[in-house]
Every structure is written in structure tokens, then in C-alpha cells.
Amino acid sequence: MKAAIFILGTVALGIGLWGSLSPPSSPPTRTDDSQAALMASYLVDGTRTHFSADGSASDVLIIGTATRWHNNDETELSNIHYQAQAEDGTAWDIDAAAGIFFENSNELALKNGVTVIERDGEAALSTDAMRLYMDENRAEGQHEVVMTGRGSRTTGSAFELDLSTNRATLIGNVSTEYE
């Protein structure tokens, strides 16, 4: 009997010490579902292809991941690769680490480093971020841009790029160095 009382006393003392030495806990909180961001869909390694009237691929969007939130027309993308072809057959590859796809307007806001390469190797363009208007086959950026071509390197404060006519226009503080 003394052993049982001793064991109960030791257990009670242990529980008391445990409660007094442990950090205080906060009561559980309830998440308000009306304000919580709910993930509507998630995609890994996706490809979206648009076709022209003659049946050939006019542009291809390849992504590493896509996250779409409930009640939002924006989709967050990572590891983005976009391929487009101009009317004259010139092919463009556009790569970015991240971006947002606006489904209603079929636009991409690319960020975290963007590279635009003419697939034939004639020109390359680098910038921090840009907006790609896929329906209009054009892009523009308001960040510093570097364009390299055959024996030249041109910098500017902003740019416009027409993927259909294969024309890039650098804007503001334009400077060219020739090799």
C-alpha cells in the first residue's frame, strides 16, 4: 500500500513539474474559411500548346509548376519556357524562373530573370522582368535590358519586342558597344 501511494505521489509530482517547466501553449485558433487562400489546382511539369489555323504549333508554354488559387484568375508559375514563332519563321525561346499567368487576358508577367533568345542564334535579350502578351505576339519590359547580337552589346532602360515581325526596340539610356 505504501508503494502504491509512493508511486501515485511520484507521478503527481512529475506531472506537476512537467506542467510548470514546459512552455505555455496557445489555444488552438480556427481559420476563417472566407479569408483563407485555398489552392484550386496544382500542376507539375505542364505543357500548353496553341495551334494556328493551318494546324502547326504557334506557341508552346512549358512550366515546372503551376499553382492556381480559388476565386483568382492568376496562376503562379515556376521554371517557365515559352516558344513562339514569327510570321517569317523566326523562332523565339523565352525562359524565366517565375511568373504569373493571367488566363482571362492570355498574358504572362515573367520575373526573377528573363532571357529571350532567337533560336537561330542571331540575338539574345536579358532583363529582370517583362510582360508577354501572347495573343498579340509581343512583349515589353520596364527594367534594364541587355541585347546581344552579331558583334554588339546594347543596353537600355526598357524595351518592346514584336515576336511577329522580329523587331526589338530598346528605350531610354540606350548604349551600344561593338566588338
Image (cartoon, helix red, strand yellow):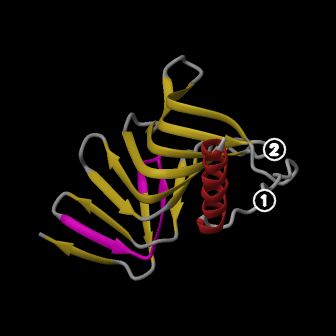
Report helix, strand or loop for mark 1. Answer: loop
Give the label on residue 27, or none.
1
Around disc 1, counting alpha carbons within 10 Å, would you say few (fewer than 14), some (14 to 19), or many (20 or more)? few
List the residue tagged with mark 2.
71
Q: Is residue 59 left or right of residue 29?
A: left
Q: Say which quarter of the image contains residue 103.
A: top right
Q: Nearer the viewer, residue 53 or 77?
A: 77
Q: Is residue 73 left or right of residue 130?
A: right
Q: Magenta stretch containing residue 156, yes or no?
A: yes
Q: Is residue 35 left or right of residue 43?
A: right
Rendered location of residue 40, percent (x, y): 72, 36
Rendered location of residue 51, percent (x, y): 56, 24
> Which image quarter is the N terminus in?
top right
Q: Is residue 108 left or right of residue 45?
A: right
Q: CA distance from mark 1 to mark 2?
A: 30 Å
Residue 169 lies, with reference to residue 81, above or below; the image says below
Q: Nearer the viewer, residue 165 or 93?
A: 93
Magenta extent: 152-167
